[in-house]
Amino acid sequence: MSDLNKLGLAEARDALRKGETTSVELTEACLKAIDAADALNAFVHKTPEIALERAKAADERIKAGDAPAMCGLPIGIKDLFCTKGVPSQAASRILEGFKPEYESTVSQQLADAGAVMLGKLNMDEFAMGSSNETSVYGNAVSPWRRGNDDTQLTPGGSSGGSAAAVAADLCLAATGTDTGGSIRQPAAFTGITGIKPTYGRCSRWGIVAFASSLDQAGPMTKNVRDAAIMLEAMCGHDPKDSTSADIPVPNFEAMLTGDIKGKKIGIPKEYRMDGMPAEIEKLWADGAEMLRDAGAEIVDISLPHTKYALPAYYVIAPAEASSNLARYDGVRYGRRAQLAQGDGITEMYEKTRAEGFGHEVQRRVMVGTYVLSAGFYDAYYNRARKVRTLIKKDFEDVFAAGVDAILTPATPSAAFGLGEMTEADPVQMYLNDVFTVTVNLAGLPGISVPAGLDKQGLPLGLQLIGRPWEEGDLLNTAYALENAAGFVAKPGKWW
């Protein structure tokens, strides 16, 4: 078989089972593609020795007939996941040289299932960003181009390296994390599928924390079936994570029938934003029509507190970040600044954090510390928490009224050029999350499915939001949408 790195998880799994290829061959094809794609800056810590060792072990398991679905499949791991003995920096200078002595639960579960780790993937520093431009490793670059324009485009953020690697066929799939849209937005920008499961479905243990009540790991894959396969391997109760849900994990792939007859799909009027590009508006309308043609009932719904979601999110997330990032002080691990004669512990903290954190992280830590400070706690943080409760109730009311899933755009535009937002007000960048943050605030599952191209030939995605713990049903609706949209476009190879 040629171009093995271009296979999806399901295709590769079936080829392995039939003996048409081996995990070693698959892995070597991906390692070759990675080495040829340094221009994308997607893989920042390559682990070929680990990959080939795991591939050989996977081939033995397959031969022995003891092979879970992910066995032998080469994947990339976002740099936010701690991986034993491998640099895990969260794309930050402050964690320079940090090699954990432990493995995150999610990456351990994937390893136990026989998945092959090819290396660590680029991301925004501490997962803070929408364009992968805040990384200590430099920008990740999208494999897509606007027509014949040579402008380098963002693959989205914070899981930009994961998105670029999957879209460019450097790996069969990758892990991502989503705090306010960081799986779904990059998936939409690069024409791949990304699902954020219900909060608590995947363990957060061993994943570097950004905002603990919002962070959730999920898969980034080439299609919906692959998302179902990988999500099942990533889910499960973890006693090491107090927010991990002790509920059974279904066989998500078995639930992909494509039959959505009688399902009720909600279209929220509040997501019709002023100035929304006509292409996004049309894609959304076309998506609703596709689901209607597949037998679903399309209904208008209202989520009245949506307009407060971004302000609430950008109070809660920085507040939690300022608390979580207090542990990076140069004392126990990671980088420590050079100190002058007579400097004490306060100077060490100040200098280490000043040179270790990038500007966006510093900005969010400052905002978070401010909203948690005496005199502002009630005015900002507590008020944002109350708004969050109202947003969650909006969704609960809609689902209680019989709606099975909600259809929205995934992003307000196609991918923009790297550097194009540098001079913009930070709030302009934050608006990239306008359709996605509500899902994190309410702890719901959401999936981005590629559904079309804009006039410049760039991918556009649609988002489906599901009921809590019903990822299987959500994946099936996404599968029906994927089948109807028939998206098969791939980036032209320029790197």
Image (cartoon, rainbow, N blue to C red):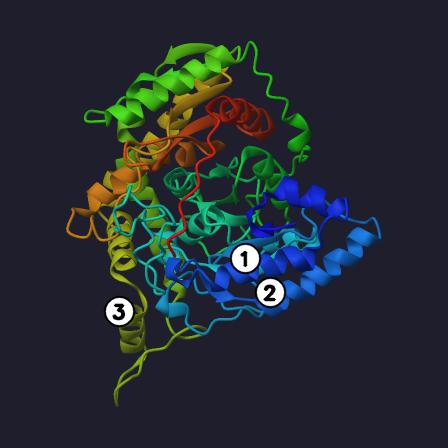
Report which quarter residue 256 is drawn in.
Answer: top right
Q: Say which label, 2 or 3, has the lower sequence index.
A: 2
The circle on residue 102 is 2
Amino acid at circle 1 = Gly
**Is label 3 in a helix, a strand or a loop?**
helix
Q: Which residue is mark 3?
A: 354
Q: In the rendered view of the protein, which quadrant contains the C terminus?
A: bottom left
Image point (23%, 27%), residue name: 276
Q: Residue at x 50, y 32 (%)?
A: 445
Residue 240 % position (x, y): 61, 52
In the rendered image, residue 343, in percent from the top left (x then y), is placed at 27, 84
The circle drawn on residue 59 is none
Q: Position of residue 89 (x, y in %)?
A: 44, 65
Q: Label 3 is placed on what type of residue?
A: Ala
Helix, strand or loop at mark 1: loop
Quick check: marks 1 and 2 in contact, CB under 8 Å?
yes
- Residue 485 against residue 236 in the figure, above or below: above
Q: Which residue carries the number 1 mark?
A: 206
